Amino acid sequence: MSNRIDKTFNSLRQENRKAFIPFTVLGYPDRETSLTAIQTMIDNGADVLELGLPFSDPMADGQIIESASKAVVETGFTTGDALELIASIRERNKNIPIVIMSYFNLALARGIEKFMKDLNSAGADGITFVDLPPEEGESVFTIAKENGIAPVMLVSPLTSPERLTRILAHASGYLYLISRAGTTGIAEKFDDKLSTLIAMLRSQSQLPVCIGFGISKPEHVTKMLDLGADGVVVGSKLVEILKDLSLPDPKTSDVTTHNPNARNDLFTAAVKQLVQATAKIEQCTSLQS
Amino acid sequence: MKLATKFGNYGGTFVPETLMPALEQLEDSFLRFSADTDCMEDLSQRLKHYAGRPTPLYYAENLSREWGAQIYLKREDLLHGGAHKTNNALGQALLAKFMGKQRIIAETGAGQHGVACAMAGAMLGIPVEVYMGTVDVERQHQNVQRMELLGARVHRVDIGGRTLKDAINAALRDWVSNLDSTHYVLGTAAGPHPFPTIVKFFQSIIGKEAKDQFSQMTGTMPDEVVACVGGGSNAIGIFSAFIDLPEVALVGVEPAGKGIESTEHGAVLQLGSDGCLHGMISKVLQDPSGQIKDTHSIAAGLDYPSVGPEHAHLSTIGRATYSFASDVEAVETYQEVSRLEGIIPALESSHALAYVKRNGHGKLYGKRVLVNVSGRGDKDLERILEYVQQNR
Ligand SMILES: Cc1ncc(COP(=O)(O)O)c(C=O)c1O
């Protein structure tokens, strides 16, 4: 078992633990803060990282991640910059799996093979393309695997059993189950068929199932893990807190009221709280077994 | 999918997994709808009695004398609502009803598609919500007022370039969150399959009529068919009847904005490269990393960084060629056509006409040229006066 994603989920399983998977947008709100935030996530108990490669037109994202992505793109941030950030995270953290979330055009523009090779050299382990269903992605997913990058596939509450078979033909690492038909964000609405969906996934695949979209509070984490998920992805909530962590723009904000330390503490506290919520489930399940 | 999802290498369904079942359902419903004779009869009756089809073909004698080519205008500006958009909006609104949807959403640039959806929604009793960039809300505010008068709700999209691209993003987000109740009436022959095919189906009536009318009026076929290209719906609509006639040249005209050497244009087929945006592979204006560029055109309906996939294909195989016209040319043409012919063309359509004006004494001299006047220009009057004031 060589790759970090499989290793991580295997040891989580052995220890009867669930995965806490924070998401943020690479380079947001600026490179330094982004690196610090990601390290904070890791130091406070992230099991897997999902890092968004910002795209100018993120049609599957809600307002928080959309604005964050646009803000980063507008600074002239390139895929090359993102690769450097990934490499410096990897340098300090040898074992944590890093899964990149992206829109297909960024891979297309770089050349699929080069994109995958570069991700691999930077130290990434997996890729999720938000807008590349199995119908369009076959050769792309093959190239990813050939280059040591696991296609982490999205499954939606609307995915039919036939479509699931097509998705599973490519899926690797874990399955990312979307909590509701909609965009990312912090709206508190989850599909009420989630437990049926998890059962369907379990019956057709051995891969761990992680749920994301809309999960923003410890209660949500608890709920998803109670439903039987192997992990949770939390994105918009964290990105929202990061929004104010960058240096203030002297033109638009009152510098004296800006207190980056306080925001930093808030961020750390949010990560800790979510990690604790993830850990609680571990205790419950280990008591049962 | 049952139909081909691509035109050569272009098109496809590059969408989030959640949308895939909706696209499959849409294709399936569209196939049943378009094969149902009652549905087709209903559409055709409404197009005739409500929307005013067929629209005339008009030989523009004065323009022909002045510009050098023999110019025939397909008068989509006379369609109810003031643009070709009604063909598609009416068709898709009926399709939405056929699918049992209770709500329609749409994006709009120039506001014409929004108006057309608002009209169709009012007539069929379906609530309509329209997404529009704030830049477009401002420059086409008369159409915002029309939409609201017709009972539609207009959402102002205030992110990105605040134009058509951003409105499509917002509409896609709404759709993916409300798939059960809502049909997204995409307004141009772009986006993921089956939209380019559906929109072409509803717009191909322009070509069918024009071909018959042209043949009746002249006993021949045009040498060249010209249309402006935003997403490409009016162009594919009129091209469709002539694609199989190799002797008829097809020319699409894109917005050169402040000049194609500048960074402010929307000349996607001239200067774009293969990319993926809004669910399709097509030509896209993008930076080397693949980030989509902001575009500019004085015509809101042409201000879009990609183009329908069939145009990318027709361009690649050389069946159609694509030229361009600048803001300045479009404005001059708008004024000249108004004075010479008593027809006020939309700024979008003025791009197609500007290309004919530029080439009338050159390669088009004496040629039979069929131009699609995709819409009327009342909506642009204020903007033109402002532009003339600023550039005097
Ligand atoms: C009058 C008119 N012509 C043309 C267009 C461009 O769209 P398309 O390329 O889909 O015909 C628009 C779009 O708003 C329009 O309003």
Image (cartoon, rainbow, N blue to C red):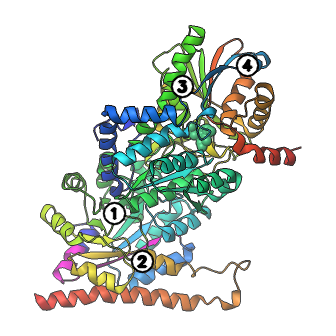
**Chain at numbered mark 3:** B
What residue is shown at x 69% (from left), y 28% (from top)? Answer: B353
Looking at numbered disc 1 in the image, what kind of residue is underneath it?
Gly
Considering only vertical position in the picture, is A46 above or below A78?
A: below
Looking at numbered disc 2 in the image, what kind of residue is underneath it?
Arg
Does the CB distance between marks 2 and 3 fall below 8 Å?
no
Quote the CA–CA distance across marks 4 and 1. Answer: 57 Å
Q: Which residue is mark 2?
A: A92
Is A16 contained in the magenta span?
A: yes
**Left/right of residue B296 with respect to residue A109 in the rendered view:** right
Q: Which residue is mark 4?
A: B360
Total numbered labels placed on residues in the image: 4
Observer able to see residue B286: no
Which of pointers 2 and 1 indicates the residue nearer the eye?
1
Looking at numbered disc 4 in the image, what kind of residue is underneath it?
Gly
What secondary structure is marked by label 3? strand
Which of pointers 1 and 3 indicates the residue nearer the eye?
3
Quadrant into which the N terminus of chain B falls: top left
Quote the CA–CA distance across marks 2 and 1. Answer: 18 Å
Q: Which residue is mark 3?
A: B320
Q: Given the current orientation, which residue lies at the most extreme left position?
A: A289
What secondary structure is marked by label 1? strand
